[in-house]
Amino acid sequence: MTAPPGEHAWWDEGVLYQVYVRSFRDADADGVGDLDGVRERLDHLAWLGVDGIWLSPIHPSPNADWGYDVADYRDVTEGYGGLAAFDRLVADARSRGIRVILDLVPNHTSDRHPWFLDARTGRDAAHRDWYVWADPGPDGGPPNNWLSVFGGSAWEFDERSGQYYLHQFLRQQPDLNWWNDEVRDAFDAILRFWFERGAAGFRIDVAHAIIKDRELRDDPFLPVEDGKIPDPRAFAQEAEIYSHHRPEVHRVLRRWRSIADAYDPRRVLIGETWARDLPDLARYYGDGEGLNLAFNFAFATAPFDGEALTTVIGATERALGDEAWPLWTASNHDIGRLASRWAEGDDARIRCALFLLVLLRGTPVLYYGDEIGLCDVAVPPSQRLDPGTRQDGSGRDDGRTPMIWTSSRGHGFTADDVEPWLPFGSGHRAVDVQRDDPDSILSWCRAVIALRRSREELRRGGQSPLDAPPGVVAWRRDLGGGLRSIVAAANVAATEARVTLARGPVLLATDGVDTGARDEVVALPPWGCVAVELPADG
Ligand code: GLC
């Protein structure tokens, strides 16, 4: 059982929503989304019940990694409307009670960032030590065995200076040197710049790996067969003890937290934390002095299976304890969409996934399109634009295709005579159709969020697991002190299940759950869900 937290920030109680800006809404009809487009859809987000949006990177970028290669941290790319569009968005969002969270990319810059252009001019350059440089290894090759997430060595040779620079991602994304105090100062100023401009916080890219082993020691990789460079995705994260997961990162996070906490209202820091295990994830919260929220990829990448989810939810609760607040997501621009990953496009499964995300103790982060059950689009290899591939070989573009607002040719994303930057795919059910249909995924998603918004137990209550047959995730949310509580059960399985829940009014249920005069045993159809209120001391 975890107790309700003593203090409640808006991001604990609220619902967050990731906007992949390029694909959300294209206001200027050039085939690419923009910030005025996001502004035009704020009413949809307010209607849905969203409290905060996280925008994928909006800065000027050569787009080698679609904005995650930043060329200027203090500007907004003209393609998205520049700084003025950001100001308009923040103002209009604020008037609807929606906060705007930015994506901070501190691990690396673009190779076209002025800092790197200078660093490259020679060993004595003012910004040389802002990046990670090293002499060749004894054989003249890379300084150590670290691998790029996108494949191959993480080191690129620089002819001019005869040294290598580190890039955990593309060679166009040189890693910053977080041992350098000037880098730390520069980012302090970047945080303040955006906080003062109205940003409600940051999602921090690669928060688990911004600082590297100072001695650049080899990672203890599994044996390399036939001298081949191994695929980094094949390695357990435990192997990456020097290139990732350095304990020194927590000092940097604490430093940012003290900056964020100094604002009124406080600003939120959310980490992209590919932690090694759940106790490791808990450390990113730093006993209340680190991140406010940390992405839980053990949950997001678990199979959609009641037993697996019960295990990971229980382990999360145990690791995070009463003080740290979990974050639940199952889709993003890297891993793809829950409607495909977890549900194979099946409505009942999508409903079940949304029920879990929104009603578990913690903050849900929906990815744009989750609310309509948008599936990934199989973008043919010839049309792929992104350099990354997922573990199964599919491209990350598949989960980044444009939002489907209407059934017209441009789907309300762009003008009907404009080609979108990525294909729409087919077979989707648009927002406007689903809005008018009480049985749609969108109506369900809104109802689950509305339930959360209306009940303090769900927004801020503690949680305890309930006994349930295999396949059923069942839990109780309450504020302690014998007050009223809510129990919820989700049958994350393809077979019917019977679960014993105390008697009380049914607050929400999927079709097929008997919500009439029932006894304490509820029959849940495959993927069926129910939330029941228990009176005080029930
Ligand atoms: C994060 C982003 C991903 C990007 C990478 C490098 O994992 O989510 O999209 O490619 O960082 O910035």
Image: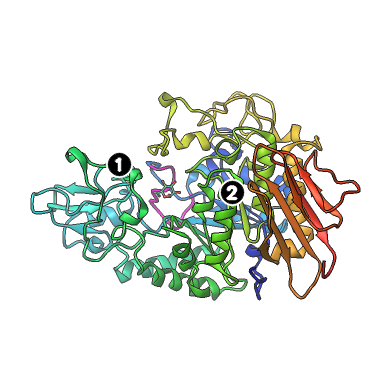
408 or 449: nearer the viewer: 449
Measured from the top left, where is residue 353 in percent x and y? 64, 45
Q: Is residue 427 above or below residue 526?
A: above
Range drawn in magenta:
65-76
Measured from the top left, where is residue 122 in percent x and y? 17, 57
Give residue 175's mark: none
**Is the CB atom of the residue marked by disc 1 within 8 angstroms of ligand 1's nearest atom?**
no
**For this view, does 97 lie left or right of residue 339?**
right
Q: Which of marks 1 and 2 precedes in the sequence?
A: 1
What amino acid is labelled 2 in the image? Glu
Q: Is residue 501 above or below residue 65?
A: below
**Residue linked to disc 2:** 307
Is-magenta flag for residue 48? no
Measured from the top left, where is residue 309 in percent x and y? 58, 50
Task: Using the rendered image of the protein, determine whether residue 47 is visible from the camera's viewpoint.
Answer: no
Q: Quadrant of residue 479?
A: bottom right
Magenta region, main secondary structure: loop
Q: Residue at x 70, y 37 (%)?
A: 348
Image quarter in which the C terminus is found: bottom right
**For this view, does 27 lie left or right of residue 192?**
right
Measured from the top left, where is residue 338 in percent x and y? 58, 41
Q: Quadrant of residue 214?
A: bottom left
**Is the CB atom of the residue marked by disc 2 within 8 angstroms of ligand 1's nearest atom?**
no
Crowd rating for badge 1 (residues with CA inside 10 Å; few <14, some 14–19, many 20+)? some
